[in-house]
Each structure stands twice: as structure tokens, then as C-alpha cells.
Amino acid sequence: MKVADIAPFFATLKAANPQPNTELEYTNVFELLAAVLLSAQATDVGVNKATRRLFAIANTPQKMLDLGLEAVTDHIKTIGLFRTKAKNLMETCRILVTQHAGRVPRTREALEALPGVGRKTANVVLNVAFGEATMAVDTHIFRVGNRTGLATGKTPLEVELKLLRRVPAEYMVDAHHWLILHGRYVCQARRPLCEQCLVLRYCDSAPRELLARQATP
């Protein structure tokens, strides 16, 4: 993607969705952290179904610990890798209580030290909860970055670093939401819905015949 096309690319996405946000349901920072931790290799819809009941009775690290591993495991058993995730969540809660006074830390280093929390999860929490200009590269962003030419790379980290360099500052805080939603609903993996794409004109992979058709008055 040409540098000159990047700003209008994001301006178009912003015009269609001025205030994008995560589709994970949460009411506090801990719930957000827990939901993102549980969302690895799972859909937001599936995570939300499980966490609605769980967060209703355990919406703090201490309440989650009080609930116990067996009960937590039972609540999230519909989510992929639920046993491992339950153990990670419980250990994360223990660390939050013993080392952070029950609060979610605001630094990348402290977040990534929590079990089950990698760079992507830390980026989501830093961005959504604390408003930092981070780029959480999931499968959708990785695909959109490579397919459009916005940020090509062989690894999520490579794509992330390119996006941090190429996305204009005024769009950075919301950029990962626009890219995720675009990948989830339009620029899909098996068959991208190019005929519905608002930013087709800026895409390196846009079908020529479709571009020609759109350009015809």
C-alpha cells in the first residue's frame, strides 16, 4: 500500500465506524484481562457466553480465587483449551492479589509476566483499558496487513512493528479495532467480501475487474 493511501484508508474506516471497540464484554479492567486471556484460539462470541455467568459472580481477582479452580473450569468449559486457561487465569489472579494489590498492572513487562498473557493480550489491555497506542496483531490483523499491503510480514511481531511505523498518529489508538473488525466481517480468510469493501481502492490485492467496475460511472 502506498504511503499516500494509508491516511485515506483509515479515514474511510473511521467514517464508517467512528468509535470502534472490542467485541469482548467486560465492565472493569480485570474482566477485560480475563476475557482476552480466555479468547486465545476462541471466538469473542464464545468467550462472552461463558464469561457472562462467570463475571456475574467473580469480577475481581480475589472473587475468582474464592470461586476456586474447579468452578472456574466448569464455567469456561465451552471455550477451547479451557483447562489450561482456567489454571492460567487462577495463577494470574493469585499474582494480581499478592503482587499488585488486586489491580491489573499498567506496564507491558508486568502484564506479560502473568500466566497466559502474551504480547497480544498485553497490547489489548494497554490499548482498551489504558488508551495506549498499541497494536494487538491477531489472525485478522495479520491477514489484513499482508493482504492489503498496509504492513506485510511473516510473523505477527513483524506486522505489528510495521503498523506502528506506518499508521498515522491520529488513527493509532483505534487502528487495531478497525483492522480486526474489517478482517472479521469483510476481509475474511476464505473469501474476502471485496464487493462490500469500503477501502478496496487502497488494497494491493483488489481484483482489477472489480476496481474497473467501481471506477465506471
Image (tube, rainbow, N blue to C red):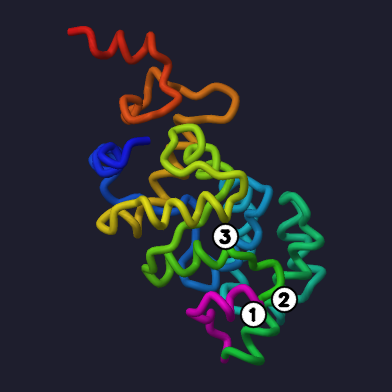
Q: Position of residue 30 (x, y in %)?
A: 54, 73
Q: CA distance from mark 3 to mark 2?
A: 27 Å
**Label 3 neighbour load within 10 Å: few <14, some 14-19, many 20+:** many
* Mark carried by residue 120: 3
| Residue 3 in the figure: left or right of residue 179 | left
Q: Amino acid type of disc 1?
A: Lys
Q: Quadrant of residue 9?
A: top left
Q: Is residue 22 left or right of residue 12?
A: right
Q: Quadrant of the N terminus?
A: top left
Q: Residue at x 33, y 30 (%)?
A: 202
Mark 3 or mark 1: whose residue is earlier in sequence: 1
Residue type pointed to by label 3: Lys
Please give the residue where the numbered disc 2 appears in the rendered image: 67
Quadrant in the picture for residue 210: top left
Q: Residue at x 42, y 16 (%)?
A: 207
Vertical order, 161 against 63 (above or below): above
The crowding category of the residue bearing disc 2, from other C-alpha atoms within 10 Å (few below 14, some 14 to 19, many at least 20), is some
* Mark seen at residue 63: 1
Task: Mark 3 vs mark 1: give the one in front.
Answer: 3
Q: Is residue 111 magenta?
A: yes
Residue 156: horizontal and vertical position, in percent? 58, 51
Q: Is residue 102 above or below residue 31?
A: below
- The single residue placed furthest to the left in the displayed view is 217
Stretch in magenta: 101-113
User: In terms of depth relative to the viewer, which is nearer, 59 or 169?
Assistant: 169
